[in-house]
Amino acid sequence: MSQKFDVIVIGAGPGGYVAAIKAAQLGLKTAVIEKYKGKEGKTALGGTCLNVGCIPSKALLDSSYKFHEAHESFKIHGISTGEVAMDVPTMVARKDQIVKNLTGGVAALIKANGVTLFEGHGKLLAGKKVEVTAADGSTQVLDTENVILASGSKPVEIPPAPVDQDVIVDSTGALDFQSVPGKLGVIGAGVIGLELSSVWARLGTEVTVLEAMDKFLPAVDEQVAKEAHKILTKQGLKILLGARVTGTEVKDKQVTVKFTDAEGEKALTFDKLIVAVGRRPVTTDLLAADSGVTMDERGFIYVDDYCATSVPGVYAIGDVVRGAMLAHKASEEGVMVAERIAGHKAQMNYDLIPAVIYTHPEIATVGKTEQALKAEGVAVNVGVFPFAASGRAMAANDTAGFVKVIADAKTDRVLGVHVIGPSAAELVQQGAIAMEFGSSAEDLGMMVFSHPALSEALHEAALAVSGHAIHIANRKK
Ligand SMILES: Cc1cc2nc3c(=O)[nH]c(=O)nc-3n(C[C@H](O)[C@H](O)[C@H](O)COP(=O)(O)OP(=O)(O)OC[C@H]3O[C@@H](n4cnc5c(N)ncnc54)[C@H](O)[C@@H]3O)c2cc1C
């Protein structure tokens, strides 16, 4: 007899495992199916985020930043270190250990919450049945009242640059270089491309980023994107905009990349090439032909605002559905769906999903950009405060960038907070909290912030919206 569950989740990434834990906490008999095997050949939970995404990339970003600081900035504090060297295999092994600890932690949480784990490939059949195929090919069919599809995404491949995970790699391969490449090409100046570029540039690699679009970071607030371009270029990243890759040739462990830009055809040779042109939803053999679940025109599983698919009782969350491909968006959708299955009226505020690029300085944003609001015809007041005027930033020798607060000109309600600077990820979250509670710029300006703290820059930017910042000369309003 097949087992019967209240909820079966397919995929144990940050969307799926959080959904499973939440469902179990709400008293639902829950199972999760995961097929991914980690470096040791064992099932590893946590999805892209923990295994080959958010966490490993941040581990390498932190290691490389420490190297950069020791190499470039310690002397300003009066610290001399002698020769600073980077042992790349140790850096990569540290990253692997963090991944192992975290994926093991998720497995422990799944168990502690009473969620049943099935190792293998999950497929939704008609009539809310789910087939699990184990690594040895054996299958079993499970019965359930509800299904949550959380199969995530994988890197987009492009014909001119086929990935061999040796010389031409995707984001996964780029986390495992065993030595510092002399010359690195990166196709794509998006979040992943810029983060991985930063890792290797800090370790001394000559990095060239080839971006097909003419505009740098088009989704980011224009003032922030301009500052980011200036700072990253100063750090040594060569960012070529309007550069469309047409072909690659791998020879003698090097790759020659052909591309066209405004000036015509060009070619550059690199030791490694990272292809970071985006991610696409994973739906391979996920749905039986008669499952009834439909896709949208871009291949994402179609869902409504509550992540319900076209089949009652079947939901989909995370990277496999519309919206930002971000771990925290996936997790919150998982929580919302579990709550709704349990009969609660949960919803999610899609307007307030923060997004961060973990370069240094970090680039973080929540709400709308000034250009988007202007295009919508919304009159706004803007306050900007530079970290160069922050005592805490000066003390930390980390003064690049600024905080920008955008408020509705009529109501003063905060509509966007955009930060480029130290701890931008943490600061933007404070903006998100204020916005969630409908704060005005004046409300934020009236709050007491600790001194000295980087968050004072948010306080001052909010005050600057009405021309009342204390620690910079205000522009006339
Ligand atoms: C290099 C990199 C850096 C990133 N950095 C960040 C960051 O800093 N912050 C951020 O928010 N996001 C970041 N992301 C994006 C983030 O990793 C994803 O948005 C997030 O992992 C999506 O979660 P998910 O649960 O939807 O899918 P995934 O994490 O992709 O998990 C899906 C899981 O489902 C499993 N699966 C798929 N199909 C089946 C099946 N049929 N049966 C069984 N199992 C199946 C897969 O093996 C996988 O484990 C980064 C991504 C990359 C690649």
Image (cartoon, rainbow, N blue to C red):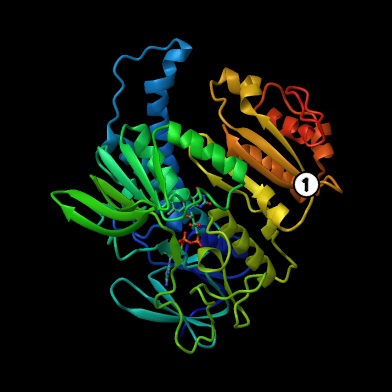
Q: Position of residue 354 (x, y in %)?
A: 62, 49
Seen as rendered, the residue at the extreme right is 410
Seen as rendered, the residue at the extreme left is 252
Residue 59 vs residue 262, the one in the foreground: 262
- Judge from the rendering whether residue 164 lies leftward or rightward of residue 198; answer left or right: left
Return the residue at label 1.
380
Residue at 66 percent across and 64 percent down: it is 336
In the rendered image, which quarter is residue 449 located in? top right
Seen as rendered, the residue at the extreme front is 263
Q: How many marks?
A: 1
Instruction: Kindly tell me whether residue 408 is visible in this rendering.
Output: yes
Q: Is 385 above or below relative to 132?
A: above
Residue at 46 percent across and 55 percent down: it is 213
Mark 1, Cα crowd under 10 Å, few <14 / some 14-19 / many 20+, is some
Residue 454 vs residue 102, the one in the foreground: 454
Q: Where is residue 104 in the image (x, y as percent from the top left)?
A: 42, 51
In the rendered image, which quarter is residue 118 located in? bottom left
Q: Where is residue 44 in the image (x, y as percent from the top left)?
A: 39, 57
Residue at 44 percent across and 31 percent down: it is 234
- Report the amino acid beneath label 1: Val
- Judge from the rendering whether residue 333 lies leftward or rightward of residue 462; answer left or right: left
